[in-house]
Image: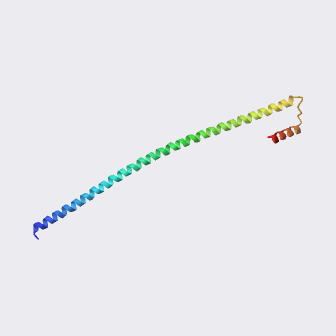
Amino acid sequence: MSTTLIVVIVIVAIIVVALIAYAASRNRAKQVEEKRIEAREHREAADSTAREADKAKLQADERAAQARRQQMEAEEQAERARAKQSEAAELRQHADEIDPDTDTDPEADGRVESEARSER
């Protein structure tokens, strides 16, 4: 084999190796870019999901606050009802005390109350 042929073979081999290295480098660069795109898509999906979760939490917090307000209003209404019942009982008692036709016997009151409960 002549020296020229050996030199040409070596140059061709170097060119082939360089082309393979270049193709591998381009392939790696393409894979890296694809992974960047995939990562960006995942981040966008995560951001969207996080926004939805924040919105759901705000709605839940708002509903809980509303429920607490309603609970407080119900308790206040119940307290007003108890006060009205107490006032009505006091007025009944006062009416019984001043009514000459009413028997103020404590045993009679107990019987009337027990009869009223049994009718309910």
Asked which quadrant contains residue 6, the reply is bottom left
Looking at the rendered image, the quarter that the N terminus falls into is bottom left
Residue in the picture at 24% in, 60% down: 21
Q: Residue furthest bottom?
A: 1
Looking at the rendered image, the quarter that the C terminus falls into is top right
Task: Please give the count of numbered marks on the rendered protein.
Answer: 0
Asked which quadrant contains residue 8, the reply is bottom left
**Left or right: 100 with respect to 62?**
right
**Left or right: 28 with respect to 49?**
left
The answer to whether residue 23 is above or below residue 76 is below
Q: Position of residue 53 (x, y in %)?
A: 49, 45
Asked which quadrant contains residue 101, the reply is top right
Q: Residue furthest front?
A: 119
Q: Position of residue 87 (x, y in %)?
A: 77, 32
Residue in the picture at 52% in, 44% down: 57
Q: Nearer the viewer, residue 83 or 114?
A: 114
**Left or right: 114 with respect to 60?**
right
Residue in the picture at 64% in, 39% down: 71
Q: Nearer the viewer, residue 65 or 26?
A: 26
Residue in the picture at 13% in, 65% down: 7
Q: Position of residue 12 (x, y in %)?
A: 17, 63
Q: Position of residue 61 (x, y in %)?
A: 55, 42
